[in-house]
Structures are given as C-alpha cells and as structure tokens.
Image: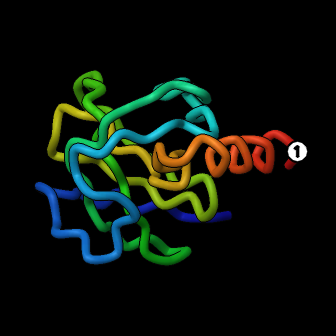
Amino acid sequence: MIKFRWTKVVGSIPTPWAKFNHMKEVICIKSHSQGVVKKGNIYQVLTSMNVECKCGPKVLYNVGIVAPPGARSVCKHCGTKRVFDSPMYWIDSKLFAELGDISELTEILNQKINQ
C-alpha cells in the first residue's frame, strides 16, 4: 500500500523545461480525469510551474480555470498528492499540444486517438 504525503506548492516556479511560452494557445489532446479540461478545446497558458514528483519532474499549467477551495492534485502515475496555494487548477502539460501548423496538429490528434 502506498502512503501519501501531502506537499504544499506555493507560487509559480520558473520553468526552464516548460514546453510552451506563457500566453501561448494550446489544444487539449486528452481530457482531464475530472473533466477540468476537455479534449479538443483550446486554452491559453497563463503561467507554468515545475514540480517534483515521485515519478520524476513535471510541468504544470495554469490555463485560467478556477478551482474550488481546498482542491488537491493527485499524480495518476505514482499517486503523489499535492495541495496548491492558488485558486487555480494546475494541469499536467502532457494533456496539451501547441497550436501550430494544422497538419502537425492533425497528426498529433490522430496519434492520440489511436492510442
């Protein structure tokens, strides 16, 4: 049985390995497990944050969706739980792809659909 330890993340940490620049439009390529973001919708990355996880470093994005008070995050890979000192949802960057060339975007979506 995995024991969970809540970690509190405060503020936004600079993101040297973030995939996108802030204020960049991205498309959701996989819906969030709780429906926070939906596949096919376009969002704008407002800020990003690096977090350490038991399964490795992650980049999380704030796309402007307000979270209910006390919202928590759980890594679907290793079960690490976090509570954020922010009224916004922080969502794994792996759920998004940069809006770019339409042929590249179509290829990404088709790959994700066929998985």
Q: Which residue is drawn at 79% across and 50% down?
A: 111
- Assess disc 1: are there few (<14), some (14-19) or many (≥20) residues with their C-alpha within 10 Å of its C-alpha: few
Q: In this view, does 10 lie above or below 28?
A: below
Q: Which amino acid does label 1 sit on?
A: Asn
**Residue 81 appears at what percent x and percent y?**
43, 54
Q: In this view, does 66 lie to the left or right of 41?
A: left
Q: What element carries label 1?
A: helix
Tell me the residue that label 1 is attached to: 114
**Residue 38 appears at what percent x and percent y?**
56, 25
Q: In this view, does 7 lie above or below 64?
A: below
95 or 9, which is in the foreground?
Answer: 95
Q: Is residue 111 left or right of residue 6?
A: right
25 or 35, which is in the foreground?
Answer: 25
Q: Is residue 42 above or below residue 54?
A: above
**Residue 114 appears at what percent x and percent y?**
88, 44
Q: Residue at x 33, y 48 (%)?
A: 61
**Residue 47 appears at what percent x and percent y?**
21, 49
Residue furthest to the left in view is 11
Work out which quarter of the rendered image holds the N terminus and state it. Answer: bottom right
Q: Residue at x 36, y 39 (%)?
A: 25
